[in-house]
Image (tube, rainbow, N blue to C red):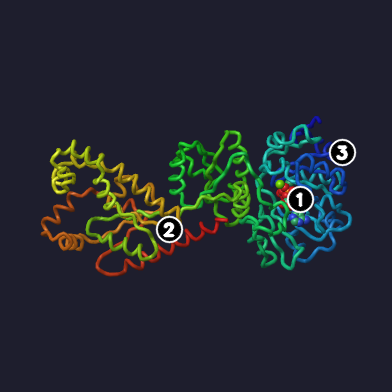
Amino acid sequence: MKTVILHTDTDPDYAQRASQVLKNGGLVAIPTETVYGLAANALDEKAVEKIYLAKGRPSDNPLIVHISSFAEWEPLVQTIPEKAKKIADAFWPGPLTIILPKSDLVPNRTSGNLATVAVRMPAHPAARAIIAASGLPLAAPSANISGFPSPTKAEYVIDDMNGRIDMIVDGGDSAVGVESTVITFAGDMPEILRPGGITPEQIEGVIGKIRINSAVLHPLQNGEKAESPGMKYKHYAPKAQITIYTGSKKGYFRLLEEKKAEGIYALCFQEDQANCPVPCVTMGSEKDPLSQAVRLFDALRELDEQGAQKVLARCPDETGVGLAVCNRLFRAAAFRFFYEAPILGLTGESGAGKSTVAAFFANNGFAVVDCDQIARQVAEKEEIQKQLAEAFGQDICQNGGLNRKLLAHRAFSSEEKTALLNQITHPAILRQTIEQALTFSRSGKPVVIDAPLLFSTGLDKFCDWTIAVTADEKTRLLRIMERDSISMEDAKKRTARQQKENFAERADQLVCNDDNTNYRNDLMSLIERIRSFDEKNKTRLP
Ligand code: TXA
Ligand code: MG
């Protein structure tokens, strides 16, 4: 079949020509403000049948009927309840679809054999002009091959539908980018079956409390019935396999870095692009769900165009239109999530009371990875000892053991020597620290990495949050004197030698551990914040 392509800005008679095709029982892809729709006469079973064929759509998935005036609504349904009327008045024309018990006028083919019918009045001027010119209610699902992302540009409709339908009307890019909000009045309470361009908050502002169907953000459980057949398991799916990372932005980059060698792609926010270690496609701005809605389906198609096989996506926030973005993205990913419990980096000046703070975290359910302990283990390794002996003299290894005092004496004698020691030991220490932290985190236990050199070793980049423990100088010196049984003078010398880490500037949170116990309140509220972040991430898991 040859598909005629018209442009709303260069073909002034597009509405007439499209309506002619529709009146003859043909198929026309039309622009709407949400996504492109594949339209046919909703009252003609044979025409509607062609939609299912062209899309490869399962026959039990009902279609939305599009109208251009309020008068066209009544004949399609049994009665219009007050609340339905109110939201139609508030949001039509626009991205809202209302489900009500259907009248006999609507064929079963259109309603997928359900006793209800979904109706929407689109806002796009071209859609309205075509409906009005045809004088028909138009059944129109999104104009994509069933299961693929919905088309927000005429090019994508052409990709999917060229040769399969009579006509495509190009009316520019869709402004909303995700499909309409679908709300049903068939039950005891109005319920959102599919979130979209109109948010639950907007609807509640007009008619009060509504329900949100549990399948909006979660897969159907075994045996559970889909209230909206379109919400069945896999949907909006690109060819690439998408996994959604539920943790922090830093955790996301950490995982991308780890998977870089596997050729992974990133589906991230535009703010992430500059630092992204792998090829990426962006889905709007992190703080702006409207921009994410506009971009999401495009981004999914772009990933396929770029040949992405595996994709790691950031998890959008679900507030406002973000609920619709999450709903589509979670389905595109077939509810595949990557979850890690939070990883914290803990550091602080010598004598500031870092160990006390680490113990506090341990008492509150965190695993503690102790870098000093790992450093000692690393120095036990034969391969490391060989390198140390070459650098600092064979006599530092005696009777198969390491003379730590002698090593310390030589290694801390100058800055160059200290750097050499670090060069030998740090890579192994880092590797082991990260490995231990990830093992805990991926088994669901939050982790604190106790790392004196958190920042200078770059370990901070690996942590979701960083915390620096501070205390005033006198307190620190007294603590060192007591801990190591040394004089004030020696304690001063020791702290002077230590690397300056610029904790105050670099840490996400400072905890002041002077001799009072106030720091416990600060810590407790931090732990609560981390817990609720973690709890939310966990709710994503199927
Ligand atoms: O924004 C939109 O709504 C776009 C544009 C073209 O208007 N259309 C659209 O249609 O997204 P479609 O067919 O891709 O999605 C319609 C959704 C499906 O999930 C379908 O199962 C559900 O609405 N639906 C339609 N009629 C229903 C009914 N009577 N009961 C329950 N769900 C229904
Ligand atoms: Mg669709």
Q: Which image quadrant for residue 320?
A: bottom right
In this image, 121 relative to 318: left or right? right
Mark number, residue 445: 2
Q: Amino acid at mark 1?
A: Asn
Count how many numbered circles sit on residues in the image.
3
Where is residue 252 drawn, in percent x and y? 47, 47
Q: Amino acid at mark 3?
A: Gln
Where is residue 213 drawn, in percent x and y? 67, 60
- Asked whether 79 or 409 is in front, the reply is 409
Marks 1/3: CA–CA distance: 27 Å
Mark number, residue 20: 3
Residue at position x 63%, y 49% in the image: 331
Earlier sequence position, callout 1 versus callout 3: 3
Pointer 3: residues within 10 angstroms few (<14), some, or many (20+)? some
Label 1 sits on a secondary structure element that is: loop
In this image, 320 relative to 59: left or right? left
Q: Which residue bears the numbered disc 1?
A: 61
Mark number, residue 234: none
Residue at position x 86%, y 58% in the image: 103
